[in-house]
Image (cartoon, rainbow, N blue to C red):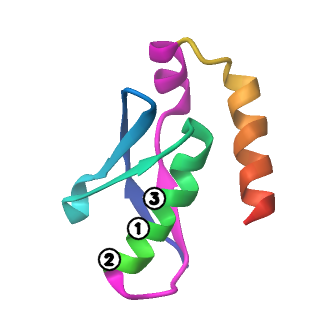
């Protein structure tokens, strides 16, 4: 069973900075679509475990805040995860 982690995201210049409050851990991604993938990697490394993790974030709120098309974002995330 996957453990769930909340992730907060904010834009800083050209990077997306994300925080995993439960672990007090911070990471960065080049695109918003990469945040879930990078966050999973950060969490797995932090826990020193290859266990399955789920990243929970409100894409609708983040997309609205930064003027990103949510359908486009979801398609980009699916593409990034397929390449993983």
Mark 3: few, some, or many residues within 10 Å (few <14, many ≥20)? many
Q: Which residue is mark 1?
A: 42
Task: Estimate the x, y position of residue 21 in percent, counting from the top left.
Answer: 23, 53
Q: Are marks 3 and 1 in contact (CB under 8 Å)?
A: yes
CA distance separating discs 3 and 2: 10 Å
Residue situated in front as seen by the camera: 75 or 58:
75
Check residue 46 in the rendering and tell me which mark sits there, or answer none.
Answer: 2
Vertical position of residue 35 compared to residue 31: above or below: below
Q: Are marks 1 and 2 in contact (CB under 8 Å)?
A: yes
Q: Which residue is mark 3?
A: 39
Vertical position of residue 77 compared to residue 52: above or below: above
Find numbered disc 3 in the image and state the secondary structure of the residue it sits on: helix
Task: Estimate the x, y position of residue 82 in percent, counting from the top left.
Answer: 80, 59
Q: Residue at x 55, y 77 (%)?
A: 52
Would you say residue 65 sits in the magenta stretch? yes
Q: Residue at x 67, y 23 (%)?
A: 70
Q: Which residues are magenta?
A: 47-66
Q: Residue at x 50, y 58 (%)?
A: 38
The reply, left or right, for residue 75 in relation to residue 65 is right
CA distance separating discs 1 and 2: 6 Å
């Amino acid at each position: 069973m996957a453990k769930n982690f909340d992730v907060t995201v904010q834009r800083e210049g050209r990077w997306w900075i994300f925080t995993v409050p439960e672990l007090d851990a911070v990471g960065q991604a080049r695109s918003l679509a990469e945040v879930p993938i990078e966050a999973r990697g950060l969490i797995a490394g932090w826990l020193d475990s290859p266990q399955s993790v789920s990243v929970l974030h409100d894409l609708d709120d983040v997309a609205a805040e930064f003027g990103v098309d949510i359908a486009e974002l979801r398609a980009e995330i699916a593409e990034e995860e397929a390449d993983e």
